[in-house]
């Protein structure tokens, strides 16, 4: 959600990964530029961007690469004929596939074009007709997905504020957009109906987002550019900072179920003035501090080291003390006269209350993370006890010998993380537990007798992965196996990897469905995870609900609809807790 537009080719728009990390940036967006018009990528450009994407990923920062008219030059005139555009689309799509292959190790997301609905201006004409853009999306998406179906593809950011334009694109491609997410650039849209003024520019952004969400077939929305000119707010830089705060507050509080990314434009006025968090001289504006305030504080989880041999119970990590909460704020506008109704809450008072609530929420999240760390330590120690005492180990076949706990306690989990094959020279990135916001369901799409061990071997030996990509694996007899620590940003859902827990059910559910034991074990696991991380049912998805893929099988949401059965069982466990 906390992204930033940068420009690695511009010294003033090229912050270091360390600065981005300290600022709280989770994703950077920039254009992959290649001036060559041949069939091969320019080696110098390729090396340049590979080094940067690798450095960002090592710092825990994702990349969104814009693939557009700078990626393959000589785009036709907006009014050029169909044949001329089709020939260009062929060349651009081929280059998109080449770039996807070169960057597969770091799995960036890819955005096809930029502002195709923008009216033609002198010196800036990314404009494409709706039907042409539809064909471009289809071919570029196919080229990228041919490299790896998990790569995430986003449509070019729409700048016109006209959902009807997107609707015509949808119609041109037969009613189904060939991308994983749509993107918008809602400049001139208010973060509140009456702020900064009820008549300020074009309207309330929430109304526009709702329309795009419906027209886009309820695909996730990425706001790939959002910002404001200082002159549009009376050249008041403090007001610009407040504009940023209010936008993030609105999206994260009320639209996080529809908007996956909000990428601010931009890092520096040296890129495009006066939108930057820094001015052209490199001085930080008030908006820079505002971004730091709204971006999540990255808690570094403690990864417990387990002893070798007989288990020794070690004291849990002592949590760092939390700062005392701020004193309650009771603005005068909230004090009601004796015997009378309270007066209307002022905008300033409401903002203070929201800020105070955000502080308390952050502290509660930190406590929750620490509890989850302790539970993880305890679970690993218990699992090691099971492994060192064969009589207590759950069998590989038949029903698990340990009965499930009542209510929403931790279900029996066999942690085989350290038993699976790993590449000693590669490792998945780490992530804070506070980053987890989704649970994504997969199937193996092969015989249910193929277990996590063989899948891990295939990933390492044949595909060059650091290890198996899921966090949990559920066998046909209902045995839950943990295959990665939750602090591992494993590889299973493309752009969702940083925020998602991956749960894989053994089997191919194109025609078949999971066993009753699998459904029951999966429901217990998912319900427990939802409680641990404060997730709602909307955060639990089959991967095909979020991306252009078949997993977890055709029967997930049609035919037998085992996804509905699983979610109903999860809901039953959650409701039993209340």
Image (spheres, grey):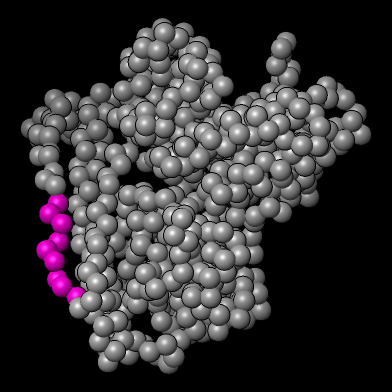
Residue 55: tell me if it is visible. yes
The question of residue 317 being in magenta is answered with yes
Q: Considering the whole magenta stretch, tell me its main secondary structure.
A: loop
Query: How many numbered circles are shown?
Result: 0
Q: Is residue 455 above or below residue 298?
A: below
Percent of width and height locating residue 36 = 76, 27
Which residue is at the far left?
A: 338
Question: Going by the image, does 329 lie left or right of 568?
Answer: left
Q: Is residue 26 above or below residue 73?
A: below
Q: Is residue 163 above or below residue 201?
A: below
Percent of width and height locating residue 501 = 42, 60
Question: Going by the image, does 414 lie left or right of 186?
Answer: left
Q: Residue at x 46, y 34 (%)?
A: 3
Q: Which residues are magenta?
A: 311-319
Percent of width and height locating residue 373 = 24, 59
- Which of the image's four quarters has the C terminus? bottom left
Percent of width and height locating residue 401 = 32, 90
Q: Residue at x 53, y 15 (%)?
A: 272
Question: Going by the image, does 394 lie left or right of 502?
Answer: left
Question: Residue 47's image quarter?
Answer: top right
In this view of the protein, which residue sits in the foreground, 427 or 328?
Answer: 427
């Amino acid at each position: 959600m906390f992204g930033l537009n940068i420009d690695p080719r511009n010294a003033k728009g090229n912050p270091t990964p360390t600065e981005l990390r300290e600022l709280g940036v989770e994703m950077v967006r920039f254009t992959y530029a290649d001036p060559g018009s041949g069939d091969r990528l320019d080696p110098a450009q390729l090396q340049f961007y590979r080094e940067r994407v690798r450095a960002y990923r090592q710092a825990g920062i994702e990349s969104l690469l814009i693939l557009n008219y700078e990626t393959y030059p000589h785009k036709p005139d907006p009014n050029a004929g169909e044949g001329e555009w089709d020939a260009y689309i062929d060349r651009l799509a081929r280059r998109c596939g080449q770039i996807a292959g070169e960057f597969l190790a770091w799995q960036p997301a890819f955005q096809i074009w930029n502002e195709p609905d923008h009216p033609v201006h002198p010196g800036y004409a990314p404009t494409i007709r709706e039907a042409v853009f539809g064909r471009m999306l289809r071919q570029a998406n196919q080229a990228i997905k041919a490299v790896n179906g998990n790569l995430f593809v986003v449509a070019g950011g729409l700048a016109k504020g006209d959902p009807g334009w997107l609707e015509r694109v949808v119609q041109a491609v037969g009613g189904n957009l060939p991308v994983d997410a749509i993107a918008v650039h809602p400049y001139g849209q208010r973060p509140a109906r009456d702020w900064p003024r009820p008549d300020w520019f074009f309207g309330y952004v929430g109304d526009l987002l709702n329309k795009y969400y419906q027209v886009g077939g309820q695909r996730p929305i990425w706001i790939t550019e959002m910002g404001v000119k200082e002159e549009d707010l009376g050249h008041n830089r403090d007001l610009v900072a407040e504009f940023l705060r209010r936008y993030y507050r609105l999206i994260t509080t009320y639209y996080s179920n529809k908007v996956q990314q909000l990428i601010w434009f931009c890092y520096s006025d040296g890129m495009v003035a006066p939108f930057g968090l820094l001015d052209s001289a490199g001085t930080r504006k008030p908006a820079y501090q505002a971004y730091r305030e709204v971006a999540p504080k990255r808690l570094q989880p403690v990864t417990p080291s387990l002893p070798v041999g007989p288990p020794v119970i070690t004291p849990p990590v002592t949590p760092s003390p939390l700062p005392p909460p701020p004193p309650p704020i009771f603005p005068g506008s909230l004090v009601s006269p004796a015997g009378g109704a309270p007066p209307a809450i002022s905008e300033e008072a409401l903002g203070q209350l929201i800020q105070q609530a955000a502080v308390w929420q952050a502290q509660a999240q930190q406590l929750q993370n620490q509890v989850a760390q302790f539970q993880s330590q305890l679970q690993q120690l218990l699992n090691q006890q099971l492994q060192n005492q064969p009589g207590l180990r759950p069998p590989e076949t038949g029903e698990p010998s340990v009965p499930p706990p009542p209510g929403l306690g931790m279900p029996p989990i066999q942690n085989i993380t350290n038993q699976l094959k790993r590449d000693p020279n590669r490792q998945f990135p780490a992530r804070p537990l506070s980053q987890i916001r989704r649970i994504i369901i997969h199937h193996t799409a092969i015989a249910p007798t193929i277990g996590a061990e063989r899948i891990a071997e295939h990933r390492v030996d044949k595909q060059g992965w650091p290890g198996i990509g899921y966090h949990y694996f559920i066998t046909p007899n209902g045995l839950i196996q943990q295959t990665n620590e939750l602090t591992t940003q494993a590889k299973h859902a493309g752009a969702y990897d940083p925020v998602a827990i991956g749960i894989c059910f053994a089997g191919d559910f194109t025609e078949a469905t999971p066993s009753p034991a699998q459904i029951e074990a999966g429901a217990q696991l998912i319900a427990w995870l939802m409680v641990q991380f404060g997730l709602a049912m909307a955060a639990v998805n089959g991967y095909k609900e979020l991306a252009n893929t078949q997993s977890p099988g055709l029967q997930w949401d049609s035919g037998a609809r085992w996804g509905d059965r699983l979610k109903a069982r999860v809901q039953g466990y959650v409701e039993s807790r209340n």
